[in-house]
Image: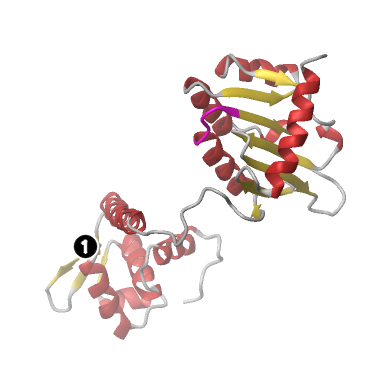
Amino acid sequence: MSPDSSDHPRQVAIEQLQAFGLSAYAAETFVTLVRIETGTAKEISDVSEVPRTRVYDAVDDLERRGLVDVQHSNPKQFRAVSLETAGQHFEQYFTRRLNRFRDATGELETTTQTEEQRGVWTVTGCDTITERILEFIDAANETVVFMSVENLLTEEIVASLSAAQDRGVSIRLGAMSETSRQEIETVVPETEFVPSLWNWAETPSGRLVMVDDETTLVSVLVPDDGRTVSKQSNETAIWGAGMNNSLVVVLRALFTWQLDSSSFE
Protein backbone atom coordinates (compact mmCIF):
# COMPACT_ATOMS: atom_id res chain seq x y z
CA MET A 1 0.00 0.00 0.00
CA SER A 2 1.53 3.34 -1.02
CA PRO A 3 1.68 6.09 1.62
CA ASP A 4 -0.68 9.01 1.43
CA SER A 5 0.58 12.60 1.07
CA SER A 6 1.96 14.22 4.21
CA ASP A 7 -0.99 16.54 4.58
CA HIS A 8 -3.55 13.72 4.40
CA PRO A 9 -5.55 13.33 7.66
CA ARG A 10 -4.37 9.73 8.06
CA GLN A 11 -0.70 10.67 7.84
CA VAL A 12 -1.19 13.65 10.14
CA ALA A 13 -2.87 11.38 12.71
CA ILE A 14 0.02 8.89 12.53
CA GLU A 15 2.59 11.65 12.95
CA GLN A 16 0.79 13.03 16.00
CA LEU A 17 0.54 9.59 17.61
CA GLN A 18 4.28 9.14 17.10
CA ALA A 19 4.80 12.51 18.78
CA PHE A 20 2.81 11.08 21.71
CA GLY A 21 5.40 8.30 21.99
CA LEU A 22 3.89 5.49 19.90
CA SER A 23 6.08 3.57 17.48
CA ALA A 24 5.43 3.99 13.77
CA TYR A 25 3.80 0.54 13.56
CA ALA A 26 1.66 1.09 16.67
CA ALA A 27 0.50 4.49 15.40
CA GLU A 28 -0.40 3.13 11.99
CA THR A 29 -2.14 0.10 13.51
CA PHE A 30 -4.31 2.34 15.70
CA VAL A 31 -5.24 4.64 12.81
CA THR A 32 -6.05 1.61 10.65
CA LEU A 33 -8.35 0.20 13.34
CA VAL A 34 -10.11 3.56 13.60
CA ARG A 35 -10.81 3.32 9.88
CA ILE A 36 -11.93 -0.33 9.71
CA GLU A 37 -13.41 -0.50 13.25
CA THR A 38 -12.34 -4.12 13.90
CA GLY A 39 -9.92 -6.47 12.20
CA THR A 40 -7.51 -9.37 12.41
CA ALA A 41 -3.76 -9.04 12.05
CA LYS A 42 -4.07 -10.04 8.40
CA GLU A 43 -6.82 -7.48 7.72
CA ILE A 44 -4.83 -4.72 9.40
CA SER A 45 -1.73 -5.63 7.40
CA ASP A 46 -3.70 -5.79 4.13
CA VAL A 47 -4.88 -2.18 4.41
CA SER A 48 -1.76 -0.66 5.95
CA GLU A 49 2.01 -0.77 5.68
CA VAL A 50 2.40 -2.75 8.89
CA PRO A 51 3.82 -6.26 8.26
CA ARG A 52 1.54 -8.95 9.63
CA THR A 53 4.23 -10.23 12.00
CA ARG A 54 4.61 -6.72 13.47
CA VAL A 55 0.89 -6.16 13.99
CA TYR A 56 0.96 -8.32 17.13
CA ASP A 57 3.78 -6.30 18.70
CA ALA A 58 1.96 -3.07 17.81
CA VAL A 59 -1.30 -4.34 19.31
CA ASP A 60 0.48 -5.45 22.50
CA ASP A 61 1.82 -1.90 22.88
CA LEU A 62 -1.59 -0.38 22.20
CA GLU A 63 -3.30 -2.78 24.60
CA ARG A 64 -0.87 -1.87 27.40
CA ARG A 65 -1.77 1.76 26.83
CA GLY A 66 -5.50 0.99 26.92
CA LEU A 67 -5.98 2.00 23.29
CA VAL A 68 -7.27 -1.28 21.85
CA ASP A 69 -9.48 -4.14 22.97
CA VAL A 70 -8.73 -7.73 21.99
CA GLN A 71 -11.24 -10.47 21.26
CA HIS A 72 -9.58 -13.84 21.87
CA SER A 73 -11.24 -15.63 19.00
CA ASN A 74 -9.50 -17.61 16.29
CA PRO A 75 -8.06 -15.58 14.69
CA LYS A 76 -7.90 -12.76 17.23
CA GLN A 77 -9.93 -9.63 16.52
CA PHE A 78 -8.71 -6.16 17.46
CA ARG A 79 -10.76 -3.01 18.03
CA ALA A 80 -9.64 0.57 18.74
CA VAL A 81 -11.17 2.42 21.69
CA SER A 82 -13.22 5.52 20.92
CA LEU A 83 -11.37 8.67 19.93
CA GLU A 84 -12.73 10.39 23.05
CA THR A 85 -11.23 7.68 25.25
CA ALA A 86 -7.94 7.86 23.36
CA GLY A 87 -7.85 11.62 23.80
CA GLN A 88 -8.44 11.30 27.55
CA HIS A 89 -5.65 8.73 27.75
CA PHE A 90 -3.09 11.04 26.15
CA GLU A 91 -4.27 14.03 28.17
CA GLN A 92 -3.85 12.12 31.43
CA TYR A 93 -0.52 10.66 30.28
CA PHE A 94 1.00 14.03 29.51
CA THR A 95 -0.49 15.66 32.60
CA ARG A 96 1.30 13.04 34.71
CA ARG A 97 4.56 13.56 32.84
CA LEU A 98 4.26 17.34 33.10
CA ASN A 99 3.65 17.12 36.83
CA ARG A 100 6.66 14.84 37.26
CA PHE A 101 8.78 17.27 35.26
CA ARG A 102 7.65 20.21 37.39
CA ASP A 103 8.26 18.30 40.62
CA ALA A 104 11.73 17.24 39.50
CA THR A 105 12.85 20.64 38.21
CA GLY A 106 11.40 22.30 41.30
CA GLU A 107 13.92 20.36 43.38
CA LEU A 108 16.89 21.35 41.24
CA GLU A 109 19.32 23.95 42.53
CA THR A 110 21.38 26.20 40.31
CA THR A 111 25.09 26.40 41.01
CA THR A 112 24.81 30.17 41.50
CA GLN A 113 21.75 31.98 42.84
CA THR A 114 21.66 35.39 41.15
CA GLU A 115 19.17 37.63 39.39
CA GLU A 116 21.92 39.10 37.22
CA GLN A 117 21.86 37.65 33.70
CA ARG A 118 25.27 38.06 32.12
CA GLY A 119 25.38 38.88 28.43
CA VAL A 120 22.55 39.16 25.92
CA TRP A 121 20.19 36.37 24.94
CA THR A 122 18.65 35.76 21.52
CA VAL A 123 15.06 34.68 20.85
CA THR A 124 13.69 33.88 17.38
CA GLY A 125 10.09 33.61 16.18
CA CYS A 126 7.09 35.82 16.86
CA ASP A 127 5.29 33.32 19.11
CA THR A 128 8.39 32.58 21.17
CA ILE A 129 9.14 36.29 21.58
CA THR A 130 5.54 36.91 22.64
CA GLU A 131 5.88 34.18 25.28
CA ARG A 132 9.05 35.81 26.62
CA ILE A 133 7.37 39.23 26.75
CA LEU A 134 4.38 37.75 28.60
CA GLU A 135 6.79 36.14 31.07
CA PHE A 136 8.44 39.53 31.72
CA ILE A 137 5.16 41.43 32.07
CA ASP A 138 3.70 38.79 34.38
CA ALA A 139 6.71 39.22 36.66
CA ALA A 140 6.51 43.04 36.68
CA ASN A 141 6.18 44.74 40.07
CA GLU A 142 6.46 48.45 39.26
CA THR A 143 6.59 49.54 35.62
CA VAL A 144 6.18 48.25 32.08
CA VAL A 145 7.17 50.30 29.05
CA PHE A 146 6.11 48.77 25.75
CA MET A 147 6.53 50.06 22.20
CA SER A 148 5.55 48.02 19.17
CA VAL A 149 4.30 47.87 15.63
CA GLU A 150 0.58 47.45 16.03
CA ASN A 151 0.18 43.97 14.56
CA LEU A 152 2.56 42.63 17.25
CA LEU A 153 0.51 44.05 20.12
CA THR A 154 -1.48 40.84 20.58
CA GLU A 155 -4.60 40.25 22.66
CA GLU A 156 -2.49 38.10 25.02
CA ILE A 157 -0.10 40.98 25.65
CA VAL A 158 -2.97 43.44 26.21
CA ALA A 159 -4.54 41.01 28.69
CA SER A 160 -1.20 40.61 30.47
CA LEU A 161 -0.80 44.40 30.64
CA SER A 162 -4.30 44.66 32.10
CA ALA A 163 -3.49 42.08 34.77
CA ALA A 164 -0.26 43.91 35.59
CA GLN A 165 -2.15 47.18 35.96
CA ASP A 166 -4.59 45.48 38.31
CA ARG A 167 -1.56 44.57 40.46
CA GLY A 168 -0.60 48.23 40.63
CA VAL A 169 2.00 48.21 37.86
CA SER A 170 2.39 51.44 35.89
CA ILE A 171 1.86 50.87 32.14
CA ARG A 172 3.36 53.10 29.44
CA LEU A 173 2.80 52.39 25.76
CA GLY A 174 4.34 53.94 22.67
CA ALA A 175 1.93 56.03 20.62
CA MET A 176 -0.11 54.20 18.00
CA SER A 177 -3.24 54.69 15.89
CA GLU A 178 -6.32 56.20 17.47
CA THR A 179 -8.30 52.99 16.89
CA SER A 180 -5.72 50.81 18.64
CA ARG A 181 -5.37 53.36 21.40
CA GLN A 182 -9.11 53.32 22.10
CA GLU A 183 -9.16 49.51 22.12
CA ILE A 184 -6.29 49.36 24.61
CA GLU A 185 -7.76 52.05 26.86
CA THR A 186 -10.93 49.97 27.13
CA VAL A 187 -8.96 47.03 28.56
CA VAL A 188 -6.11 48.90 30.24
CA PRO A 189 -7.83 52.19 31.20
CA GLU A 190 -4.98 53.93 33.05
CA THR A 191 -2.38 53.39 30.34
CA GLU A 192 -0.07 56.33 29.71
CA PHE A 193 0.70 56.83 26.03
CA VAL A 194 4.07 58.36 25.22
CA PRO A 195 5.67 59.36 21.90
CA SER A 196 7.37 56.44 20.17
CA LEU A 197 11.11 56.57 19.64
CA TRP A 198 10.67 56.68 15.88
CA ASN A 199 8.18 56.05 13.10
CA TRP A 200 7.70 52.32 13.46
CA ALA A 201 5.90 51.98 10.11
CA GLU A 202 9.05 53.12 8.27
CA THR A 203 11.50 50.83 10.06
CA PRO A 204 11.96 47.06 10.49
CA SER A 205 11.59 47.49 14.27
CA GLY A 206 9.36 45.01 16.05
CA ARG A 207 9.00 45.55 19.80
CA LEU A 208 10.77 47.34 22.66
CA VAL A 209 10.06 46.33 26.25
CA MET A 210 11.42 47.48 29.60
CA VAL A 211 10.15 45.98 32.86
CA ASP A 212 10.99 47.41 36.30
CA ASP A 213 14.06 49.16 34.80
CA GLU A 214 15.97 45.89 34.90
CA THR A 215 14.64 43.62 32.14
CA THR A 216 14.69 44.74 28.52
CA LEU A 217 13.91 43.22 25.14
CA VAL A 218 14.21 44.63 21.64
CA SER A 219 13.16 42.90 18.42
CA VAL A 220 13.39 43.52 14.71
CA LEU A 221 11.38 42.22 11.78
CA VAL A 222 13.39 40.42 9.13
CA PRO A 223 11.89 40.59 5.61
CA ASP A 224 11.30 37.15 4.10
CA ASP A 225 12.43 38.36 0.69
CA GLY A 226 15.28 40.42 2.06
CA ARG A 227 13.57 43.71 1.15
CA THR A 228 9.93 44.13 2.25
CA VAL A 229 8.72 43.98 5.85
CA SER A 230 5.23 42.49 6.21
CA LYS A 231 3.02 40.87 8.83
CA GLN A 232 4.52 37.54 7.77
CA SER A 233 8.11 38.69 8.32
CA ASN A 234 10.26 36.77 10.78
CA GLU A 235 10.94 38.37 14.15
CA THR A 236 14.22 38.16 16.07
CA ALA A 237 14.86 39.63 19.52
CA ILE A 238 17.62 40.11 22.06
CA TRP A 239 17.00 40.52 25.77
CA GLY A 240 18.89 41.02 28.98
CA ALA A 241 18.20 41.22 32.71
CA GLY A 242 19.93 42.78 35.70
CA MET A 243 20.66 46.37 36.67
CA ASN A 244 24.23 46.11 35.33
CA ASN A 245 23.44 44.12 32.19
CA SER A 246 24.87 45.95 29.16
CA LEU A 247 21.66 45.85 27.12
CA VAL A 248 19.59 46.95 30.10
CA VAL A 249 21.92 49.89 30.77
CA VAL A 250 21.72 51.12 27.16
CA LEU A 251 17.97 50.74 26.74
CA ARG A 252 17.21 52.10 30.20
CA ALA A 253 19.11 55.26 29.27
CA LEU A 254 17.25 55.46 25.95
CA PHE A 255 13.85 54.95 27.55
CA THR A 256 14.60 57.38 30.38
CA TRP A 257 15.65 60.10 27.95
CA GLN A 258 12.54 59.57 25.81
CA LEU A 259 10.10 59.43 28.73
CA ASP A 260 11.63 62.43 30.50
CA SER A 261 11.58 64.41 27.25
CA SER A 262 7.92 63.57 26.61
CA SER A 263 6.90 64.94 30.01
CA PHE A 264 7.85 68.45 28.87
CA GLU A 265 5.92 68.40 25.60
The image shows residue 217, relative to residue 184, as above or below, that is below
Q: Is residue 140 magenta?
A: yes
SS class, disc 1: loop
Q: Quadrant of residue 48?
A: bottom left
Q: Residue at x 26, y 70 (%)?
A: 39
Indicate the colouring scheme.
secondary structure
Left or right of 77: which side holds 15? right
Above or below, comparing residue 29 to residue 103 in the picture = below
**Residue extending furthest bottom?**
53
Q: Residue at coordinates 12% horizontally, 73% vertically from top-left?
A: 72
- Give how far across and how far down residue 157 sits, in percent: 57, 32
Amino acid of disc 1: Gly
Instruction: Please tell me whether residue 134 belongs to the stretch shown in magenta.
Output: no
The answer to whether residue 231 shows anywhere in this view is no
Question: Does 253 appear above or below 85?
Answer: above
Dot 1 corresponds to which residue? 66
Q: Looking at the image, which residue is at 72% across and 45% down?
A: 219
Position of residue 195 measured from the top left corner of the image (x, y, whole percent): 78, 23
**Magenta stretch: helix, strand or loop mostly:** loop
